Amino acid sequence: MDAVVKRRAAAFVCRSCTRRSQKQLQLQLQPQLRLRRSYSSAPPGPDIYDVVCVGGGPAGLSLLTALRTNPATAHLRIALVEAQDLSKLRSWKLPLDRFSNRCSSLTPSSVLFLDKIGAWGHLERSRVQPYQEMQVWDGVTGARIEFDWASGTPPPAGTTIAYMVENLNLTSGLLRRLEELGGVSVFDNAKVEDISLGSETEELDLREWPVVDLAGGKQLSARFLVGADGANSPVRSFAGIEARGWDYDRHGVVASLQLEGEGWGGDQTKVAYQRFLPTGPVAILPLPGNLSTLVWSTTPANASLLKSLSPRDFIAMVNAAFRLGPTDLAFMHSQSSGQDLEYLWRLEHTPFDSRAVPQTVTGVQEGTIASFPLKMRHANTYVGERVALVGDAAHTIHPLAGQGLNQGQGDVQSLASTIEYAVSHGQDIGVRMSLEPYVSERYLANHVLMGVCDKLHKLYSVESGPLVSLRSFGLNAVNSFGPLKTFLMNQAAGHGTKVF
Amino acid sequence: MQSPSAASVEVGLFPKPRSKLSEPSHPHPGTARQIPEMRPSLLLSRHTPTLLRQQQQNVSRGVFGCAVAAREQTHHPHRQQLQLQLQSLAKQHHAACSSRLFSSTAAASTTSSSSTSSVNADEISHFSALASSWWDPHGPSRPLHLMNPLRHDFIADCLASSPETATPSPAAGAQTRGLRYLDVGCGGGIFAESAARRPGTHSVTAIDPSATILGVARQHARRDPTLATGTRAEPKLQYLNASIETLPLPAAPEPLFDVVTLFEVVEHVDRPAAFLDACGRFVRPGGWLVLSTIARTWTSWLTTNVLAEDILRVVPRGTHDWRKYINADELRAHFEDGAVDGGDRRRAAEWAAERPAVMGVVYVPGLGWKKVAGSEKLGNYFFAVQKRDVARDR
């Protein structure tokens, strides 16, 4: 006790100290560590960060932007690790008549969040296209649901269902915002060689702290490691979190298309179209002017055929996909070429309402036809000790509802507020206890949405039998029942009562 | 200075209004806060005044009476292990105890040095046994971990309710460099660590009489570079193996503490009245004494003893002794002092007991703690009282 009293007395004698913020303390910590290194022959120790985010995609960049924007979390010491060269993203620029083929549909709630963190204003707004209506129909029976606000009651706020944004426009805007805020140590062009656990020194016990080893020997010690590193997340592997799910045996074919006009509703009322074919849904989503983006989920064989076609034949296939019957389409997929003429001939014998389908596709931008395999994956959990997963690292969803990126934004929003709560309540932001709210807020919500999209995919893969009439009955019933439709539209737009 | 009736005044903290009426008024007002010479651990079981016994008997007639009686019998009197050690520690620092605000209290504690401690050895060994699991978020301390953010919310509400805390009078030892916390009965450091990490904290001094548990606390703090003491001249977080009675008051001009916290502690100490007084001495004028505890009601007996310990087993057995629970109105009466026994109301002069902060909380398994207005009358609750800043009020 003598010692205790003396130590305590000594502590009270020192009155010359000044107020030190957490940041200053952390800064102070660094020289100490360097000092330790200088007299030991051991290799340089890791740099200590509060947050290390692996992955500079939409999820990672928005998370860091949110943390830097919020005064409560702005003092955190943050590092971003990205495998790509960010200077390319920084200088990303395309003329207005050319669009990247990877676009996402951002819900108003995602946009609201991006605006809140100051990033929305940094996007090239002339390249963002809001759309106000949706047309969704069954390719087998023609049962249709028209998500046009006129048929239901007027929407509570705004008429925009979602905003079509090129992923690169979003990420480059986020990067500009993040660099405007500053204060983030960016390690780009940096390969993560290894993630291990820290060690114990005389003063510190960092055995539960992840240490990220970058190519070139740089080491980052993380109070909290965020895996925003995509579907094959190395952070997820490090944390030993398994991702379960299945491959759909489908590929998503994307392309940037040119249509004959600005759309049936003109510039003011843009419409998104989606038709459920037995091979998977095909969607045309509006971009500015007469441009649109295509997302066509189909079999790998069909996808490779589509990619091999001449532009003329490819365009014919896309037009056919929204107009001809499944049998016609199946036949056209068996031809190696000549779809152009085949389409024109078959179109003459197919009755359809031209205003109920997208305007005729007249061109496809060179080099924009690409495909990627579709999967459904869900990590067993989103957190481990000092680790959390966001975006595709946590879940990969079927793109039929355009929810993948929005789910990631929802994750980020939740994680950022979880961190804010933890910081303001003095919790260690990395420990599992602090991260629990994030999991409970997001896991079930994502799971339900993923389940719905998965079941939709399966429901519409069926070509005949009682299920087909049932689903058509369901779709028609929903279509003629205004309140339910308004509810669904509000859900898609991310406002109204939160269910997902 | 000891008088037998002083004991009943002390214990008068516990009981309900009924007991207040028949309590003998104190013959020597100046000694109202004196601590009787008796083994602290026996205070409740053997030396419990008739009134309290009556109360317990009344209780026994209720639905849960049998269990209470059973507990009474198993109440173990041998708990003096640490007492000697603490007594010697207490002697060492009595001289250091400032008497600038509480001269009579300080005097009282000097004269009763053989039993100043509120520390209960059984409680110490109980919590020391829990040391290894203290920081396991799914271990027996999980409810405490979950409650921790609410503690900060409650303190923030208290500070916000009184502007003078933020800008105390110069006489109060103005703090413009952040809050100084004293966490009494810090255990493994759940609150102390978080308070030290919070923005706006100058420093946290955390004390606990259990060396075992403090070892856990110190080891755990090493996991966070912002807390690790290292070579820093003035650490954010300092753990001391001490009871409140053995802790020296900061020597002037070192300021007293802005916030003194006693979370889930008063229900584990032997003489809460003396204990609260001892803790109160460390609060600077305008500062807050903040605590959380459990009301002594049939619901709290059912939930904290029967349900939590015996049935659900979310809390280790023997953690709670229902008879030690204190109700919010009793705490308030304590700080209003003379209101109870017609004494000199010195506590009332020192504490703004007319406006204590009270917040009832309810634990919902699976959801955590929820604030429920009025639930301080049922079970767990927070209580805070501000020390008057006389210089400022003048």
Image: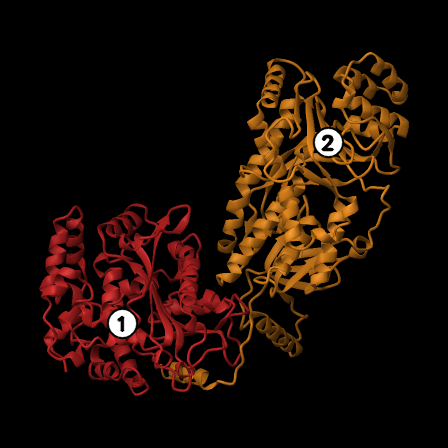
Chain colours: A orange, B red
Kind of residue at disc 1: Phe
Task: Please tell me which residue is depicted at 69% across the width and 17% down the height of the picture.
Answer: A142
The subunit carrying tag 2 is A
- Left or right for A241, reference A323: left
Residue B52 showing in the rendered view: no
Is residue B160 visible in this depiction of the protein?
Answer: yes
For label 2, count other residues whose C-alpha is less than 10 Å away and answer few (under 14), some (14-19) or many (20+): many
Residue hosting label 1: B275
**Marks 1 and 2: which is nearer the front?**
2
Q: On the picture, is A477 further left or further right than B256?
A: right
Amino acid type at image mark 2: Val
- Residue B379 image point, x, y percent: 29, 54
Q: Residue at position x 65%, y 69% from top?
A: A45
Estimate the spatial distance between the alpha carbons at disc 1 and disc 2, rounded to whole Å: 72 Å
Residue A4: image quadrant is bottom left
Q: Classify A205 as above or below B303.
A: below
**Subunit bearing disc 1:** B
Q: Secondary structure at mark 2?
A: strand
